[in-house]
Every structure is written in structure tokens, then in C-alpha cells.
Amino acid sequence: MTTGTLIRRAELDGDATADVRIEDGIVSEIAARLTPRRAEEVLDARGGALLPGLCDHHLHLHAMAAADHSARCGPPDVRDPAGLAAALARTPPDERGWIRGVGYAEEVAGPLDARSLDRLYADGPVRVQHRSGALWVVNTAGARSLGLEDASHPGVERDDRGRPTGRLWRADDWLRTRWSTSRPPDLRAVGARLARWGVTHVTDATPDLDLVAVDAVGEAMRTGALPQHVQLLGAPLGWTPPGNPRAPTAGPYKIVLADSGLPGLDVLIERVRAVHDAARPIAVHCVSREALILVVLALECAGPRAGDRLEHAALVPAELLPRLRELGLTVVTQPGFLAHRGDAYARDIPAAEHPDLYRARTLIDGGTPLALSSDAPYGPADPWAVIAAAMRRDTPSGRTVGAVERLTGRQALDACLGAPQAPGGPPRRVAPGTRADLILLEAPLVEALARPSAGLVTATWMEGVKVWDANIGM
């Protein structure tokens, strides 16, 4: 039985190689040459880069797990109505008899409602989520099953006669109440996938989590199904974290500014104050200019708190850059969306606003901390694809959006190495006394950043325990 790990000839900080010893979950020694101990596992890095594990600063764990059992309803998997109908037909129903689809985009079959969805699938209840995550569409069988005629949730869209259209806006919390016996999906496959990519820390950005969802994440961490460290933006105000390393922590509090119904300024100011009074910063979902201006005004009135952050910041006018810096805001953004749906942005957003899309370099240069993330499953989940997108900023067709916003490879990597509690802050480093949440690449850092790929990750350790080994496929 091994008592520790000695990693030989590992490149550190993109510089010289050294030997690194892991004991009791921490990095205990680093030296040019260390002598192996009895019963110590010895691994030869062969000059590959040894890094702190990556942090995905904004994703949705349970939605990722659910997407694994859902029909893919948008590009590149589906591109027309026939393809969508086929995708729904070949997807097995869940335990409640529902077909679930995700990732829908209007370019496939136009705006969906219950009637148009009936033409694609009418053999049972079906629900399809828009790729933004903000909208679910159900067919007539689904509307009947949910009792939409009598539903009072404000997100249930109705026509001019008051009849439900089958479109449900930001109604995930209400939908969960309609399936009171449902449990959050198992996270084991998600945890394994993240470990394979070298992700050791995640921030779950799902808003308004109930205690069932919070406890499910905690249970997955305790059992090892989810080996990553987890911070929750949606943890209820007043929730007390268990306080052990294998339990989730509460991060800034998620506030969603839905462009389909922005709140009044006074309402937002009071909400910000309530969150700050509960000793938590805010994390504001903000994808439009209007939403960003509203957040800035609210914080200028309510006052900022250290740790306040903007989620997405998809459109940032240049004139607002100084105000973001003055308020001490951090931006957590997703350049992967450019690689995934950048052509749609270029088509649908006025050309004058293209320089404002998913800013990166100008935020850093302007003094605003920047962290990268995936927004999985709504954006590309692979962190190395996110890093590549931040460096290249190319759309699927090869068009470049905002070349001046490109990051260097090191800047993009560092934006994935900040601590969950300090996204965009100093990148974590491999050093004696630090927790052994580490990844080993098969190549030196310069080579790895010239061709970012998850395939470069050969091993991942969580608190000194190997949770991914490319040699044995664990």
C-alpha cells in the first residue's frame, strides 16, 4: 500500500523541472531531486507541466447530468425539423414518461410552442429547453400533464385568449414542484468527466437551489461520486455550510436579471442590500446592455461588496468599463459561446455591438478581474476548449469576433486557476504546503498552450488522491 506520491521531472510554472512530493493531501516538498521513500508511488512526468487543478467558475452540475439523458435539439447535432423529430423519437422517456430535449435554437424549426412541438412529437409528454436555459417548451400532452390551464406561475406564457402556449419562462423551480417525487440526477458521470479534463474546483451557478439539491451535491461529494470541490451560488440565504472539505460552500448569491422581465431599479437595489446584509456578495446573471446598466446603477446606489461579480457580461459597452473597475466587480464570462454560436451572434446582433461581445482583454487591461467558465451544459463544457476559444475568438465558420479581446495562452489558463472564492484573482500555484489538487500534462506548458486539449491531461489528483489516470482510464 502506497503512503504518498513522488512526481519526478515535473515542469513547474512553465519553467525548470523539479521533483514534487505529495503527502497527506498536500504538496510537502519540491526540490531539484528527491529520494524515493519506501512504499511511495513514483511517477515520471518526463518534463510535462504540473499545474493546480482547473476551476470552472460557472456551470450547472445537475443540468449537466440531466443533459446526458436528453435529446440534443440544436446545432451541430440537429439542423432542421426532421432532424429534431428524429432526435425526440429515439430518446427514451424518463421515469415519469417524459421525453426531454435540450439545446434548442430557433434556426432549427423557428420559435417553438405546444402546437409546433405536437407536429414533431405527439406520442406523449415532451419538453424541450432553449439553449439559453431560460425557456422550456412543452407539447399539448405535456401541458395537460402539468396542468398549465390552471397554473399561476408568472412564467407560464399565455396567448391573447389566456390559453397557455406551452412556453415556460424561467420556471424550473415551479416545474420541480410538479414532479415532487423526482430526485436530482446522479453526478458520478459528471464528476468523472470533469476529472478527466483536469477540473478540481467548480462553482455551480444554478439559482434558487432548494435543500434537496444542496444535499444531493453534498452527498455526491461525500461518497466520492463528485470528487471536485464545489461552491454554490444558489445556496439559500442563511444556509450554513457543513464546514468540512468534502461539502459544498456558499458563494456569492445568484440574482437572475431576465431580459424578458427586468426588475425596476428600486426593486433591484433592495435585493442587493438584502443579500449584502446577509453577508454575501452578489453574482448577477447579466447578458444585455440594459441589464448591465441596471446592475451598475443598483450597485452605485446600494454600494458594492467585495466579491460582487457579473455572470456572463455578454455585452459590455466600452463606456462602462471604468465603472466596472470602480465598483470592484469581477466578470465571469464564457468565450466558448463564440466558438459554439458566434455565427448566430454575428448575424443577430448589430455590427456596432460586436466589439462589446464577451470582452476579455480590455477588461483585464482596464483593471477588472476576469475569470473563464463554461456555463455547461449551455456552453461547451471542456475547459481546454474554453481556453482555446479565449485565445482565438473564432466562430464555427472561422470568422473572428473581437480580435483585440484575444487572451494569451497564459492569461486564459490563469483565468481558470483563480480560487473559487476569488475568480480572476491570483492564479493558484504548486508550492509546498498547498493542497494537492493537481493535474499533470503530457507536455511542457508552452507546448500545451499552443494546442490546448483535454487529451493532454494524463493525471488528476484531489487532495493527493488520483482521480484520473490516462494510462488506465480511471
Image (tube, rainbow, N blue to C red):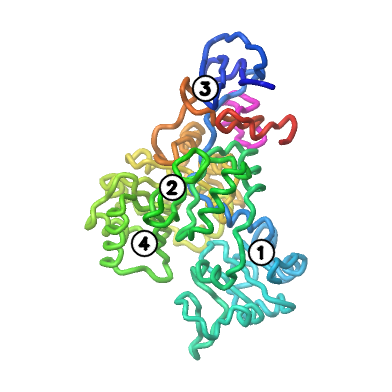
2 or 4: tag closer to the N-terminus: 2
Q: Could you tell me how far apart the alpha carbons at marks 4 and 3 are, in whole angstroms?
A: 44 Å
* Magenta-colored span: 440-456
Q: Are marks 2 and 4 in contact (CB under 8 Å)?
A: no
Tell me which corner region of the image, top left, top right, bottom left or bottom right, holds residue 24.
top right
Q: Could you tell me how far apart the alpha carbons at marks 2 and 1 are, in whole angstroms?
A: 37 Å
4 or 3: tag closer to the N-terminus: 3
Residue beneath disc 3: 27
Tell me which corner region of the image, top left, top right, bottom left or bottom right, holds residue 392.
top right
4 or 1: tag closer to the N-terminus: 1
The mark lying in front, picked from 2 and 1, is 2
Q: Count neighbours of disc 2 (C-alpha within 10 A) and say few if under 14, some if 14 to 19, many if 20 or more.
A: few
Residue beneath disc 2: 241
Q: Secondary structure at mark 4?
A: helix
3 or 2: tag closer to the N-terminus: 3
Residue beneath disc 1: 73
> For the residue marked with disc 2, what is the amino acid?
Pro
Residue beneath disc 4: 291
> For the residue marked with disc 1, what is the amino acid?
Cys
Quadrant for the N terminus in the image: top right
Tell whether position 452 is magenta: yes
> For the residue marked with disc 4, what is the amino acid?
Ala
The mark lying in front, picked from 3 and 1, is 3
Q: Count neighbours of disc 1 (C-alpha within 10 A) and say few if under 14, some if 14 to 19, many if 20 or more.
A: many
Left or right, 431 with respect to 252, comes to right
